[in-house]
Amino acid sequence: MQTLSHYAAAQRQRSTPQAPLQRLSAPWVLPWTSTSSAAKIVRIVTVGGKVANLDDLPSPSADFAWPYRVSVVAEHPGAIDMWLRDTTAAAIASGLEPAIAMSWRRRVKAVSGVLGNPFVVSLADALDGKWWLPTDPVERTAFVRRAFVDVSEQISSVFSGTPVVPPLSGLVNPANTAVDRALTSRSANAEYRYVTIAGAMTAAYRAQDVIGMYEAMLTGETTLVTPVAAEGAQVVATVDSQTKLKMGKQAHVLVPGFGGVGLARVDSFGMTSDGRMTVTLTGTLNAKTGTLRASTGLLEMIRAVTKGRQRSFGLFETPFTRLPNPVRRPVFLDRQAPPIVRDVPLAVSLAGALTR
């Protein structure tokens, strides 16, 4: 079985500045939820260790709002920290409460770690995620300069790509909503939950891509299976790669070269007589009729079995997409909680009083 390191080395060997290989067919940066207008991309311009275009970038505010459809792009990893440092200092100097400014800074930093989010984009991470680039820093820099005309073309390449197909596109809206709530949340705990959920959904977005799924199969995020038996809305398939599937979970059925085409339930695991691992998949339950309903992907598996064709499919465990309710009450970790005052009976107070 091919390993991820061998696959990555082979892909980087084939990738050239004249014809760079894509690591992801879809855009690395998730498309914005709304398509009513074009997104505004603002680059962080740094000069002499400071941000030169601070007024053009989002800044802390008392209403915790993020500008509509604005993507901040950092050309080098340190630019995000410089921007957060300078804009927080400027906001505090202009009179904004330090607790609010520092809370905003913390949340933006956390969101910047969600790979693929359209709010705060590290160009270096995005290029590495979209293209197979050399790992050596010197070779990588030379490769990028030869493959792209300028920084604008680099940015364009990570925002563009083949549109994703349903139901993969259904991950984009909840992922962006989770990131937006992480930015505008008043609670540190809620912020952490939103960032964690967004990270899981953006990982699912990449692993179900028509190109990215091959890499994900080598990590177990996507499982390669071959159907060998079928009855009704149930399929038994051999497991041909590493797997992280769990019994009772819903999984997307992926057709290599096409994408996700429906859901199936991971019913059980087993073994064949020659020692190969199998997984039993069932359709989803129809609440009205009480019967199992096979999705398009499961039907494709059934057809492969009935026609005697040996065809491989991918399975990816459906990420948790239910978002917790937003917390509206501001909670700042660096504020001292007000003292709790309770009425105590006089006898109890006297009993606990100091005596001579």
Image: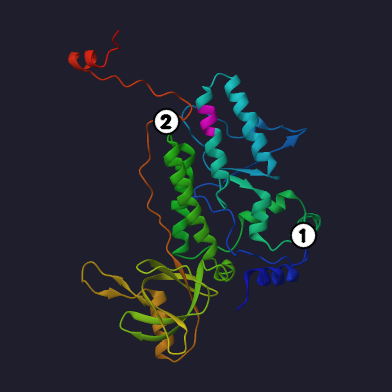
Name the N-terminal-most of marks 2 and 1. Answer: 1
User: Measuring 69% from the left and 67% from the top, which residue is drawn there?
Assistant: 21
Q: Is residue 226 inside the magenta stretch?
A: no
**Which residues make up the magenta segment?**
100-104
Asked if the residue at tag 1 contacts the one at tag 2, i.e. Cβ–Cβ closer than 8 Å, the answer is: no
Measured along the vertical axis of the image, is residue 1 above or below residue 45? Answer: below
Classify mark 1: helix, strand or loop: helix
Between 10 and 142, the one nearer to me in the picture: 10
Residue in the foreground of this view, choosing between 36 and 227:
227
Estimate the x, y position of residue 211 in percent, counting from the top left. Answer: 59, 69
**Measured from the top left, where is residue 141 in percent x and y?**
79, 54
What residue appears at the point 71 percent right and 72 percent down from the top-left corner?
A: 10
Q: Is residue 67 in sight in this rendering? A: no
- Relative to 119, say whether 136 is above or below: below
* Residue extending furthest toward the bottom: 308
What type is the residue that disc 1 sits on? Ala
Q: Quadrant of residue 75?
A: top right
Answer whether residue 205 is visible to the viewer in this image.
Answer: yes
- Assign the magenta stretch its main secondary structure: helix
The amino acid type of the residue labelled 2 equals: Val
